[in-house]
Amino acid sequence: RDFFISYNSQDRQRAEWIAWQLEQEGYSVYIQAWDFLPGSNFVLEMQLAASRSKRTIAVLSENYLDARFTQSEWAAALVQDPTGERRILLPVRIRECNPEGILKAIVYIDLVGLDEAVASKRLLDDVRAVVQQRNKPDTPPAFSC
């Protein structure tokens, strides 16, 4: 799939919103809330989702940064792309928080303080730029002297 959504359970609603936006745009997503069904092995499902996805979206909040279990999810993505050239780890900040250490150096998509329409546009525009490896605007730049 295109994306594995890594999130803390306290941020489930926003993680599902991100997954919904991406799927509506035609991307395929693994997300625990929808894909880890009763009777499945949680650890195995997590490993399969992370390893079978092209990219990992880390849903950033204080909840996420303070949680022990989310660290292995974003770290696994970072191991595959330590310099960030392939943009395998794609952080999306949903609440005020300050990533520290290794995560501090990674540019995130910032949705904090945005209304839903603006947040959706920013998320999808930035994801499209990452996938296409270019951030060319949809309209021509203004010509002015």
Image (cartoon, rainbow, N blue to C red):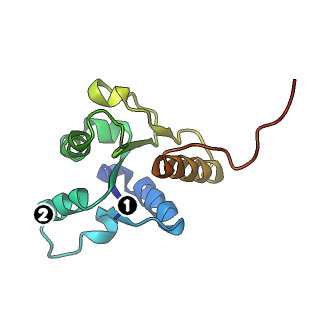
* Picture quarter with the C terminus: top right
Residue 13: x, y in percent? 43, 57
Q: Nearer the viewer, residue 112 or 55?
A: 55
Q: Does residue 98 appear to the left or right of 23 in the view shown? A: left
The image quarter containing residue 97 is top left
Q: Which residue is mark 2?
A: 44
Q: Does residue 95 appear to the left or right of 66 in the view shown? A: right
Residue 7: x, y in percent? 32, 50
Above-or-below relation of 2 to 122: below
Q: Secondary structure at mark 2?
A: helix
Q: Residue at x 46, y 56 (%)?
A: 18
The amino acid type, in three-letter code, at marker 2 is Leu
Above-or-below relation of 105 to 71: above
Query: Residue pushed farthest right?
Result: 145
Mark 2 or mark 1: whose residue is earlier in sequence: 1
Residue 104: x, y in percent? 35, 26
Checking the image for residue 114, the label placed there is none
Q: Around disc 1, counting alpha carbons within 10 Å, would you say few (fewer than 14), some (14 to 19), or many (20 or more)?
A: some
Checking the image for residue 2, the label placed there is 1
The amino acid type, in three-letter code, at marker 1 is Asp
